[in-house]
Amino acid sequence: MNQHSDIDRLLRHWMDDGPTTMPDRIIDVVADRISVQRQRRSWRLLRRLPMNPIVKLGTAAAAVLVVAVVGYNLLPRQGGVGGPTTPLPTASPTAIPTSSPVASGPVDLRSGILSAGRYRMDLSFIDPGLSIVANIPEGWVGHPEIPALTSPAGSNEGVLIGFMQADRLFSDACHWDLDGTGSPDQQGDVVVGPSAADLVSALQANTSYTTSGHEPTSIGGFQARALELHLPGGDVISACDRRSGESTGDYFVFPGGFYAQGPNSRWHLHIIEIDGTRLITMISIAEGTSEAEFAVAEAIAMSFEITP
Amino acid sequence: MDRELVVAAQRGDQVAFMDLVRARLDRLFGIARRILRDVDRAEDALQDALVIAWRDLPDLRDPDRFDFWIQRVLANMCIEHARRDRRRYARLEVLTIHDHVASDELAGVADRDVVDRAFRRLNPEQRAVLVLRYYLGYEPAVIAELLGLSGGTIRSRLHHAHRAMRAAIDADARAAVGGSSA
């Protein structure tokens, strides 16, 4: 439309005019202000979705407690996608560095920065009565509403410990929006058998991420399997399906669970069978996470006392 | 290299953040200046936006989208600043055009003050979309993503902004030649 194009031309020409050089003093002002401004600590925690009571899938069904503890640099890089290669090294308990004495009795996990101590995390959303007590060092952050724990470092170099349950997976963790609604509540399209081994097999068979071996282990006196997932880089994740209202993509391995906590993150999972319930514990590690930080997270996981 | 600076800044490196800011300061100021049409207010809005950007930078998941993200922070801050000062912009008026100014006369409008006055009559949201469209050259879909709005909303704002600009310029032109204005 001619009039519209006239306005277009006017605006383009007019926009070119005007001062665009910022006074140098503003730099100093901004520098002063940010020196006293704390940054957010950002963890991409998805609020736990309401879950139906777990259907006990037979006596052999075990809660796969996927303790995702992603170990940075602990495993050799894997070539290709989708297949297990070398087995995980056996995790050795590491002394938890604490700056203050550990309290004797567990207290319920609370929000915010924690003092060193024993904390109870309510996992009744997975199975009624299920809880875990862990020795948590000074400075870690509690998120009881999830529940989850995050390390003192920021999300780009810290650790997230979370808990999930999974009876299904997404065949494509990047293109998880199966019904096109952008809702993170969707069920996965891959049905997983009831045992920890079933879940390990399903994860290993998935070609949208890389897995690293699996090792039998035990957590809190219950049989478990350890498995590491290698998630893709930011160029892949940014192009993944988006939750409604979000401007960039999300990467969901487990329906209704945590999504990728950044590019090239690793999830070290412990899949635990607890008297017919399968619980997933996840330790998510970012690209910048140090081995020392991971070691602390691993020690926390190894301290788990599980109450079914 | 910018990606490394962003990642460093996300980890709390203030020097890295200021390096990122210095490289973009003039362009960001240009955006603020054009939305707010006032140098002092643009400086204030830009300062506030940069502090918010520092605070929220760890929330940025993809460091490669830093430029897009900080423009979003700034645009929203400019809109907020513009809303605060209700005395500085006129309420949007629906101008009834009785004697439509011919397009060739419109094409001859060279008075930047006319365009400036017309722009100032827009609401902050309309100004922002026009700056993003004509100063940064973003397509409506990109503007929608930057402002977190639907494409339909952006197209609607652009349409109404154009109409309002047109009406204001027409009214100004009629007043200049002694005609009546709405």
Image (cartoon, coloured by chain):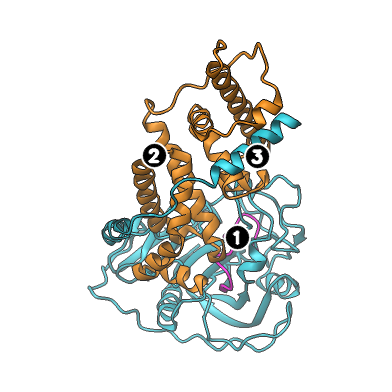
Magenta span has B4? Answer: no
Q: Position of residue B6 (x, y in %)?
A: 47, 68
Please name the residue that numbered disc 1 is placed on. Answer: A165
Query: Chain ID for label 2?
Result: B
Label disc, if present, on residue A9 of the rendered structure: 3
Q: Could you tell me residue A286's position as x and y percent?
A: 51, 72
Chain A, chosen colour in render: cyan
Q: Main secondary structure of the magenta part?
A: loop
- From the image, which quarter does the C terminus of chain B lie in? top right
In the rendering, which numbered label is found on residue B160?
A: none
- Secondary structure type for disc 1: loop
List the residue tagged with mark 2: B38
Identify which residue, A152 or A2, lies in the foreground: A2
In terms of depth relative to the viewer, which is nearer, B22 or A244? B22
Find the magenta span and give its range. A253-267
Are discs 3 and 1 both within one chain? yes
Q: Which chain is orange?
A: B
The disc numbered 3 marks a residue on which chain?
A
**Percent x, y for residue A93?**
43, 84
State whether residue A242 is above or below residue B40: below
Residue drawn at 54 percent across, 52 percent down: A48
